[in-house]
Amino acid sequence: MLKSFHTVGTTEAGCDEAGRGCLAGPVFAAAVILPPGYQNSSLDDSKKLSALRREQLRKVVEREALAFGIGVVDEKEIDAINILNASFLAMHRALSQLKIRPGHLIIDGNRFKTYGDVAHTCVVKGDGKYASIAAASILAKTYRDEFMGRLHQEYPVYGWIRNKGYPTQSHRKALMEHGPSPYHRRSFRLLKDQMELDFS
């Protein structure tokens, strides 16, 4: 059973991102505020859950959370500010969507850029430790996967419906054969030999 970080008397929001290691598409982030003492034995790190279970839990989180927000930073912004800053920006955008102002943030990972005057704590592998971060990881992952499914309809040759933009062997093979799409991150090393790609 995952726990609350529980800063006594303070509304806590968990934050996580999805898509940081992808070659294509945006990075998504979610922020979630759960009710005090909230418990759900099914919540876990989204990477440990099946796609079906994630979708089921997405509905539960959206129904039972006190507030949640989704933030998106697209591939052009990622190329302009780098993926680390883009991840922070996506989290900030998710936090700005919350209808309740949190008093404390718990962030999955080891780094974060301060959001206004709200105190935060970074927790490595926090999505497997704290319920609100796990809930955020589920929302970020499912919203991004849904978005990549729509992009797949536009550019099916890259197999995004399956790989979601991650650097799988089949994704790299499609890049070799077809070159990059407008949704690929030009600042990323798309292939071992970047000179093999035509960005024109």
Image: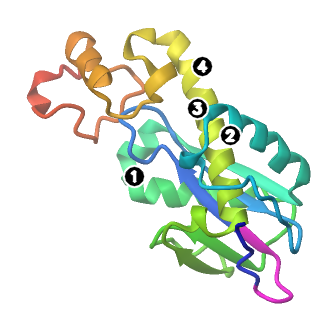
Amino acid type for the residue under numbered disc 2: Arg
Of mark 4 and mark 3, the one earlier in the sequence is: 3
Question: How dense is the environment of label 3, judged by Cα within 10 Å: few (below 14), some, or many (20 and up)?
Answer: many
- Residue 191 left/right relative to 118: left
Name the magenta segment's main secondary structure. Answer: loop
Q: Which of marks 1 and 2 is in front?
A: 2
For the C terminus, the quadrant is top left
Residue carrying label 3: 145
The magenta span reads: 7-13
Residue carrying label 2: 54
Residue carrying label 4: 150
The colour scheme used to paint the residues is rainbow
> Can you tell which mark lies on residue 83?
1
Amino acid type for the residue under numbered disc 1: Ile
Secondary structure under tag 2 reads: helix
Secondary structure under tag 1 reads: helix
